[in-house]
């Protein structure tokens, strides 16, 4: 039995996509015969307020911390606190494993954060296979920082990210764009880099009709659901929702999220009496119902950031068969995947482009049921989103049960 150490602040019962991704990966590796140990934070996203987690997962040991941390409201400062705290938490966790003589055969680090891996890699024995899974390229977003402080910060992020990536034996990226950018930026060896799209993690609803009251009949429901931060361009996204809501009486816009951006935007648009409904993130057992009640789901991508990440909720939307409208760059991999699935892609953050794309997406929703689109996606694109491919890269054979 292979012993695998999974390193990420975000793990069950974390609500955002990265937490679900990590949880699904751990479950899959467990089913394939591995012994799983996780070093993580107590759930903190998307409002950056840690909540003590009592939940356990059968067969998986989780070493948590950080429930007493108070993250500042400044985005840079709270990211810095997360980086520093998690580096210390992982350091202590690996020392604990060394003391207990339970060192892993394989270490799987989920990036970002990145700083923790500089110290923890030095504590791991040389025979431990080190695998990194890159969800975001922080250097892409840091390049947008302005001023002397911003440039210094971008240089520091570039240094840490390069060091962390270079210490891994294998690196998995969620898109080819990300991999090619990282290889170019950090001089990574092509033989060590792989592209594995995020897997489908959607399960059947365990609480049917729990969302019925917030999706009234007689309306077409346009939904954004997930974390709302810098890379979603939230202020512009809600402005587009507001402008589009003025053009039709039977279209209702929903934003499911939490956190500082969400609270500020909710306050702003409630005061304008806009036709936008704001809701907390739904529990995982309600996610399937949320998608089934959505006529269109929106995926926004900040201009100039397509090489930095690929939304890990994309395969769940495709598996649910919900029409998707993406706002992204003309050459982005996200746009290519949405086009392949028969969804709609717009390349401009303007009311005209967004409303036109939305009308086309709603037209798809009129012509096809979710089940029609789900079956088509299963045949054309979902085979590319395989958890087994990821497990093989990590080092656990599909036959090793």
Image: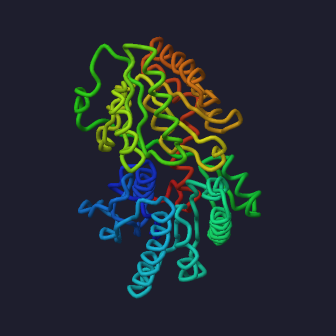
Q: In the picture provided, is 320 more to the left or to the right than 307? A: left
The colour scheme used here is rainbow
Q: Is residue 52 left or right of residue 338?
A: left
Residue drawn at x 37%, y 22% is 252
User: Which residue occupies 61% across, 27% down?
Assistant: 346
**Vertical placement of 298 versus 31: above or below?**
above
Quadrant of the frame with the N terminus = bottom left
* 152 versus 307 height, above or below: below
Q: Quadrant of residue 22?
A: bottom left
Q: Residue furthest bottom?
A: 99
In the rendered image, the quadrant that contains the C terminus is bottom left
What percent of the width, then of the height, locates residue 151?
A: 68, 63
Residue 222, placed above or below residue 365: below
Near-viewer residue (82 or 322): 82
Judge from the rendering whether residue 131 lies leftward or rightward of residue 202; answer left or right. Answer: right
Residue 304 position by quadrant: top right
Residue 268 can be seen, yes or no: yes
In the rendered image, residue 175, in percent from the top left (x then y), is placed at 63, 46
Total marks shown come to 0
Near-viewer residue (18 or 34)? 18
The location of residue 153, given as percent across then percent down, is 62, 66
The location of residue 289, given as percent across then percent down, is 32, 31
């Amino acid at each position: 039995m292979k012993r695998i150490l999974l390193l990420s602040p975000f793990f069950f019962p974390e609500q955002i996509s990265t937490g679900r991704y990590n949880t699904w990966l751990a479950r899959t590796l467990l089913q394939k015969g591995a012994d799983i140990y996780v070093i993580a934070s107590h759930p903190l996203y998307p409002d950056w307020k840690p909540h003590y987690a009592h939940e356990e997962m059968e067969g998986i040991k989780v070493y948590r911390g950080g429930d007493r941390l108070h993250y500042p409201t400044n985005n840079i400062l709270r990211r810095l606190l997360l980086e520093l705290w998690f580096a210390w938490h992982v350091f202590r966790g690996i020392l604990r494993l060394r003391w207990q003589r339970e060192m892993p055969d394989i270490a799987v680090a989920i990036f970002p954060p990145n700083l923790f891996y500089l110290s923890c890699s030095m504590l791991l024995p040389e025979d431990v296979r080190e695998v990194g899974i890159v969800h975001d390229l922080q250097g892409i977003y840091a390049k947008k920082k302005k001023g002397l402080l911003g440039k210094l910060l971008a240089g520091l992020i570039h240094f840490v990210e390069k060091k962390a990536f270079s210490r891994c034996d294998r690196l998995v990226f969620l898109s080819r764009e990300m991999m090619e950018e990282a290889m170019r930026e950090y001089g990574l060896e092509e033989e060590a880099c792989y592209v594995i799209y995020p897997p489908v993690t959607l399960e059947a609803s365990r609480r049917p009709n729990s969302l019925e009251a917030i999706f009234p009949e007689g309306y077409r429901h346009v939904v954004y659901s997930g974390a709302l931060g810098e890379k979603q361009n939230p202020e512009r996204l809600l402005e587009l929702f507001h402008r589009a809501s003025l053009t039709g009486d039977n279209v209702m816009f929903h934003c499911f999220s939490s956190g500082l951006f969400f609270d500020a935007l909710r306050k702003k648009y409630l005061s304008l009496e806009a036709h936008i409904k704001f809701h907390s993130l739904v529990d995982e057992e309600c996610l399937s119902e949320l998608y089934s009640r959505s006529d269109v789901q929106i995926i926004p991508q900040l201009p100039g950031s397509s090489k930095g990440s690929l939304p890990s909720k994309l395969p769940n939307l495709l598996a649910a068969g919900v029409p998707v409208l993406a706002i992204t760059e003309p050459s982005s991999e996200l746009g290519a995947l949405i086009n392949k699935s028969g969804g709609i892609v717009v390349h401009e953050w303007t009311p005209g482009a967004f409303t036109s794309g939305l009308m086309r997406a709603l037209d798809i929703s009129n012509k096809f049921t979710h089940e029609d689109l789900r079956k088509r996606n299963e045949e054309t694109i979902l085979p590319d989103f395989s958890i087994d491919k990821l497990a093989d890269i990590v080092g656990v054979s599909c036959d090793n049960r």
